[in-house]
Image: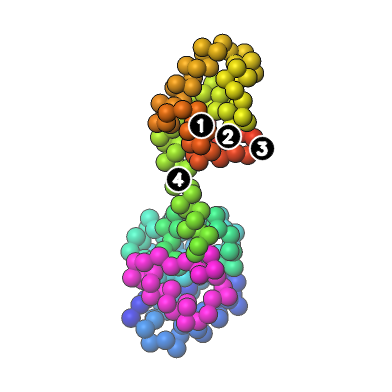
Amino acid sequence: MLNVALIDDHPIVLAGLVETLRPCAQYRIVGTGTSRDAAMDLVRDGAVDVVILGLTPAVTMIDVIEEITAAAPDTKVLVFTGTSDVQTCIAALSAGALGYVLKDIAVPDLFYAIEEVAAGREFIASTMASAVIREMRLAEQRRVANATVALNSREGQVVRELLNGASNKEIANKLNLSDKTVKHYMTQIMQKFNVRNRVEVVLQAQRIYGKVDGQTRHFA
């Protein structure tokens, strides 16, 4: 039997959760509450296996997840929310939640989510899962790129001009540099990108930084 705590700042939603879980022999509701303080009291005072957490605004919910994770690391957090924002979901998972479901979830799916989270496995609402996974992968790629390829200010300017299709001579004129200096920066950039020529520099820069209004992103 799983000990479950229910927290939601909308009393009618909280009552609905209680009525949904109470008839199920596999769950024991050890407490309910409508606030951050109630959530912390429950996880500190008893052995809570899973806390179903629905608090607004999102920033409060993220803070509570972090507090629960720190105070009761064995308690699993399942976020129960009406917010389908991908970044909020990622922030909740990063704060320590194992599950993120929306309030329009079907009852059997909610039960499945609780079981998955209780077993230590992540569960994301099916309507959001693909977008969340994609964004987390892109974020990791950006993090790795920023950690491994740090261009200084002048190198960044050179790459911006390259992405706009400028030749070495045009770059020299635009940045008030000599042709020799531009070639030096190009050599440095190729070494940092681990490529062999200016075409590969452009392709690598597009892959790592992307283009926004003709300008690259994430330069050091």
Secondary element at tag 4? helix
The answer to which of marks 4 and 2 sits earlier in the sequence is 4
- Vertical relation: 168 (above or below) 200: above
- Vertical relation: 57 (above or below) 195: below
Secondary element at tag 1? helix
Does residue 126 belong to the magenta stretch? yes
Viewer can see residue 53: no
Amino acid type of the residue that numbered disc 1 sits on in the rendered structure: Val
Distance (Cα) linking label 3 and label 1: 20 Å
Query: Which is more foreground, mark 2 or mark 1?
Result: 1
Q: Nearer the viewer, residue 146 or 208?
A: 208
Q: Identify the residue shown where x is 33% and y is 81%.
A: 1
Neighbour class for label 1 at 10 Å: few (<14), some, many (≥20)?
A: few
Magenta residues?
A: 100-128
Does residue 194 belong to the magenta stretch? no
Q: Name the residue under label 4.
A: 141
Amino acid type of the residue that numbered disc 3 sits on in the rendered structure: Asp
- Vertical relation: 56 (above or below) 201: below
Q: Name the residue under label 3.
A: 213
Residue 192 in percent (x, y) is at 42, 28
Amino acid type of the residue that numbered disc 4 sits on in the rendered structure: Gln
State the residue lying farthest toward the right: 213
Q: Name the residue under label 2.
A: 216
Q: Identify the residue shown where x is 42% and y is 86%.
A: 24
How many numbered discs sit on the rendered protein?
4
Viewer can see residue 199: yes
Q: Nearer the viewer, residue 69 or 193?
A: 193
Residue 136 in percent (x, y) is at 47, 53
The answer to which of marks 4 and 3 sits earlier in the sequence is 4
